[in-house]
Amino acid sequence: MHACSIDLRLKILGRLPFFAGLMPADLQLANQQFIEVGYQPGQAIYSGGQPGERLFVVADGKVKLFQQTAGGQTVLLDLLGSGEFFGNLSAAFGSAYTDTAVAQTSACILSIPTEAFARLLAGHPSLVQQTLALVSERLSAANRRLLQLSAMPVEQRIAQTLLRLVEKLGRAHDTGLLIDVPLSREELGEMTGATTETTSRIISQLQSAGTIESGRGWLAVKDMAGLRKLAGEE
Amino acid sequence: MHACSIDLRLKILGRLPFFAGLMPADLQLANQQFIEVGYQPGQAIYSGGQPGERLFVVADGKVKLFQQTAGGQTVLLDLLGSGEFFGNLSAAFGSAYTDTAVAQTSACILSIPTEAFARLLAGHPSLVQQTLALVSERLSAANRRLLQLSAMPVEQRIAQTLLRLVEKLGRAHDTGLLIDVPLSREELGEMTGATTETTSRIISQLQSAGTIESGRGWLAVKDMAGLRKLAGEE
DNA sequence: CGAGACGTTGAACCTATTCAACACTGGTGG
DNA sequence: CCACCAGTGTTGAATAGGTTCAACGTCTCG
């Protein structure tokens, strides 16, 4: 079991945009209400439909958030890194998780009962603002993606998705801006609403055009301007 | 200009799930901070990209929320009725509206500066819970739609969309459950990610199967069970 | 009544999927 | 240590679902 040190816990919580406005004493108090669990790569944190009583925060590692049809088709909703939250914000009676969360790498996850989080909110207006802003942000992102899916061809969707990933997770590297997450063709497909095969074809084509470079589980952008153009963002 | 009476204002605000937990005195106070504007059908309330400094509430009428590509392709995000909110919840500096709001019918809209709303939130934990629950709900809805668009054929998407509309706006009628909003083929297409033509074809086909009945700007469901089956929800 | 918006239907076309075969890679066990 | 095998990636060809373009019918409102 991958776990995280107490030092790491306080450091993570303290650095959360969430808790930016809290006094150290309050932070300690908040910290006491979180529990900490380690996960193996591929292990489920929760599944859609289960009663959703907790709010989670990634302390270390990466978490995959997705939804599935009955037939197993998957939409990858988000890849979360250290400091990001997920789970259920609504303490409404009987509310359930609407998505599924799985550890993508080995990960250390903090969590707090939604109810306890609600109590924290009640005492800290700045926390309320942060939380609302973050959820609104995600709603906008989801809406942008709806526009992508209903109005843009696969190539453009992939270009935009790669841009977003580079902005969020880009790291300088010999061959270009490396996306710092192991990402398979299948997963990239699940992010863009395309099949593995189509995704592979587009990646190949972007590669021979010199826009990106990619191998098994890694991808680096060589020509940001070119990618932006394909994404329709000039 | 369509406007609304003071009586209507207090009644609307008082009935909002939002303000359910407020004391009458607080409600009065909140009421004072709202301003009220009337809109003609088709008139814009705000547009994507504009600095977003207000939060809106539908007092009377219907409001259409959507996003557009540069080329004018549109995704209809939501149809809002009396009591529902929209606008910008994030008071973050420089944040802008990410979508566009247009009055679909003539409408009376209340609005409050995001900042003033933030102050209300600070004093009323129950209001915080309501707001978070509503935004989370919308995020889930957007996520469900992402799954639709990337994994389901048009017929199923339309069936699901009609089901959702009937649940939200259904009204008993001679010919079946009438969706109580004037809805064109084009708009239904924008809700499902299909062209007007495809939408028309599917509607015709549903009609000859006896599942629904529809004319210019109206649609009624005759066979809910059949529609559910097409929607894949048994 | 007429004009313009809305709705319908047909046929050609095209993008992305599906099905299939094959290549490469990395890790495991013999 | 190497061989094998499962997972991952690539590529091709056939297919299908939906779009596009086009023409025509029909309602409504000014």
Image (tube, coloured by chain):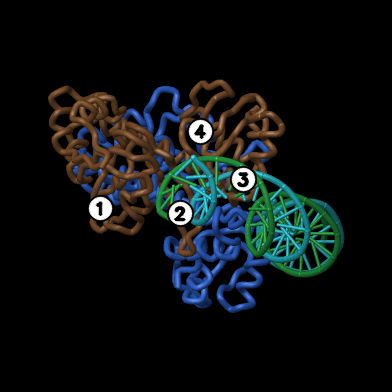
Chain colours: A brown, B blue, C green, D cyan
Residue B70 position in % (x across, y down): 65, 36
* Labelled pair 2, 3 in contact (Cβ < 8 Å): no
Q: Amino acid at mark 4?
A: Leu
Graded by Cα atoms within 10 Å as few (under 14), some (14 to 19) or many (20 or more), the crowding at tag 3 reads many
Residue for badge 3? A199
Q: Is residue A92 visible?
A: yes
Q: Chain of mark 1?
A: A
Q: Nearer the viewer, mark 4 or mark 3?
A: 3
Which image quadrant for residue A176?
A: top right
Q: Earlier in the sequence, mark 4 or mark 3?
A: 4
Residue for badge 4? A165
Of residues A63 and B36, which is closer to you in this image? Answer: A63
> In the image, which disc is placed on residue A92?
1
Q: CA distance from mark 4 to mark 1?
A: 33 Å
Residue for badge 2? B144
Graded by Cα atoms within 10 Å as few (under 14), some (14 to 19) or many (20 or more), the crowding at tag 2 reads some
Q: Residue at x 35, y 36 (%)?
A: A61
Q: CA distance from mark 4 to mark 3?
A: 16 Å
